[in-house]
Image (cartoon, coloured by chain):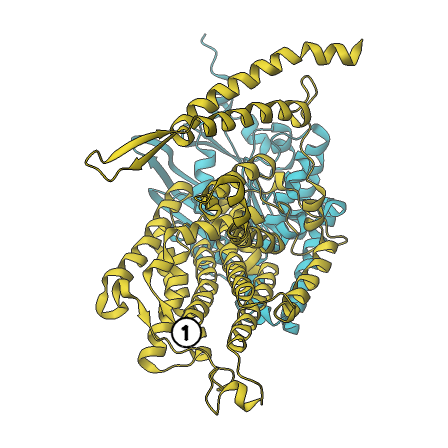
Chain colours: A cyan, B yellow
Amino acid sequence: MSQPLLSVNQLTMRFGGLTAVDAVSFDVHRNHITAVIGPNGAGKTTAFNCITGFYKPTDGQIVLRHKDDNEFKLEEMEDFRISQHAKVARTFQNIRLFGGMTVLENLMIAQHNHLMKASAYTIGGIFNTPSYQRAQEAAKQKALAWMDRVGITDRADDPAAALPYGAQRKLEIARAMCTDPVLLCLDEPAAGLNPKESEELNALLRSIRDTNDVGILLIEHDMSVVMEISDHIIVLDYGRKISDGTATEVRNDPAVIKAYLGVVEE
Amino acid sequence: MSLNDQTSSSFLPMIKRSIIATIIAFFLFLPTLGIKTSASGGVDGLFLTYRWLLLGIGCGLIFVGRIAYELFWAPKEGGQKAEKAPSSLAKALGSAKVAKTIGPVLLGFAIIFPFLPFSDRYILDLGILIITYVMLGWGLQIVVGLAGLLDLGYVAFYAVGAYSYALLSIHFGFGFWMCLPLAGLLAATWGIILGFPVLRLRGDYLAIVTLAFGEIIRIVLLNWRSFTGGSNGLSDIPRPSFFGLPFNQSENGFAATLHLEYSSMHRIIFLYFLILALAVFTFFVTARLRRLPIGRAWEALREDEIACRSLGINTVNTKLSAFAIGAMFGGFAGSFFAAKQAFVSPESFNFMESATILAIVVLGGMSSQLGVVFSAIAMVGGVELLRQLQFLKVIFGNDFDPSQLRLLLFGLAMVLMMLWRPRGLVSTRMPTVFLKDKKTVSAAMISQGRG
């Protein structure tokens, strides 16, 4: 197997006396969907926030490799630089859209760094140079392509806050993808979706995995999503990794069954 | 049976509520209207005069007013209180089409304004003042309206601009057009200097620090006598000239060169067009900035800072750029102010100015440039209008000075705005980019920012 896209090595995060993530190591591969599961409070979101730079890990290394063998030490980078340079995009458990801005604007903001350069850091943009106009038009087309892909094109000019919940989830994924990530981190993308929407989400994530050359790392409680689409599952409990493997392997792992269902005393 | 019955059954409670309101008003008015302290010439110092008639009139007005409110405006009991539809005026101002027509009409009016028959020196001065505030409002709108950062010390940048022009022109003999960009640059620098310490602050804390910053600048100007002249200010600031032609009676002055009869109005008209040009410049630049990636990032920052960071937006730079560019326009306006007055002193840059500019932005609507124009006219023009109400002396006696009611009406206007249009005159926002059709975004969706 080729070099993993993301290697998490001995990741530890302590909040005072509480060790939320305890020496967790795992790999995420390109064109794979890797799921992190575990009971409430297992440290999934904390691990996630460490990878995306929203927390500084207490210990451990997180290395991201680009195709050109560029390596990024994510544990040393600021959150926005992780997105800007290392190309890791994320969504949030409680959706964080720019509610007062339209769907299209949300997708344009995701292309901020690219457009900033195209507008010569605003100076060229003020004079509306042809190169900026082209970049703006291209950004719009890219946004349109993603709206088409997740099926919200007809709501393009509506404020994001006016969208139904399921569409907001999709928009957040589309927005993350507009940053051209190599690693897409989704924090409970299926939370609050009905079965039909969950089904659509599965199809969307599969198509992103197969066509966009990204690795997907997701946290999910909805087992129908996890078991169906994951190529690789990591199970956390009390901050430790208790299992790691394919869906079938994890499902039959006694440690996982114990963590989820408890042990029957005999 | 229906209507009459209902009316009579609600009549008694209505009277009861009116009486309660009157009693509350009585106690409120007692110290404010009912009792007046007067200084006596003798050893007693102060003594009280009672004004029972005035107190009675006040309470009577409250009683009648409360009944009128209940009869005509109060929400009907039992009926679902529907979400208030914006009034037609506000709705009209918010729509793209109307904004596109009103804008040029206003600009056209502003251009012919100095040549209208009623435009004397006083009216033109007022026009200059209003346009200055419009410009300041547009500058502050970047910080408060777009980026959602509450700035209570905006007047500091106005002061930096004014003193920059004053000092540069006095010490180095720089002309107005030379000083203008320098003043903008210096103000922007101070904007960044203010920006750094407040990067991590939000809401109330941000407001307090910016407020303090405004005061610090004023106090430094007041106490650094050797540099700023202290409370005496700086006088004899060179006045701007018209492409090198000074506005005076000399042979190479503006009037003589153009073979016009000398009139002091020439200079005023020139200043009027100068600030109009600066304001139009501000308008186009801020309107353009809003449509650029940087402007969208400002708005995104107001909506959700964490989401911004997750998309790779450098929020530090974005915040600092909002402070700097907002401050820059304040600096431009300040340098015009110094050029117009030919005199600057710390007096002109007190907190009241910051509050007025902020009120203009808030009343106008956080993201509507047109709203700012109307609220500046109302706030600045309205105050001047009070001075014109001298005929009220016939009713209230000779001691009555309507301009003293300024703050009272100011407060009243604020309360009424909070009741009826809490998000400002134009509360909707216009998308910066659209696919098929441009629809305004209603205020309910827009976040006000927490910083």
In the image: residue A89, left or right of residue B117 = left
In the image: residue B253, left or right of residue B370 = left
Q: Quadrant of residue B189?
A: bottom left
Q: Nearer the viewer, residue A194 or B423?
A: B423
Identified at 43% across, 37% down, the residue is A46
Q: Callout 1 environment at 10 Å: few (<14), some (14 to 19), or many (20+)? A: many
Above or below residue A106? Residue B13 is above
Q: What kind of residue is marked 1?
A: Leu
Above or below residue B69? Residue B343 is below
Circle 1 sits on which residue?
A: B182
Q: Where is residue A154? Give x, y as percent.
A: 77, 46
In the image: residue B28, left or right of residue B388 = left
Q: Where is residue A121? Give x, y as percent.
A: 52, 67
Which image quadrant: the N terminus of chain B?
top right
Above or below residue A85? Residue A207 is above
Q: Nearer the viewer, residue A158 or B394?
A: B394
Identified at 42% across, 31% down, the residue is B33
Q: Where is residue B43? Give x, y as percent.
A: 19, 36
Q: Where is residue B213? Give x, y as percent.
A: 33, 53
Above or below residue A88? Residue B232 is below
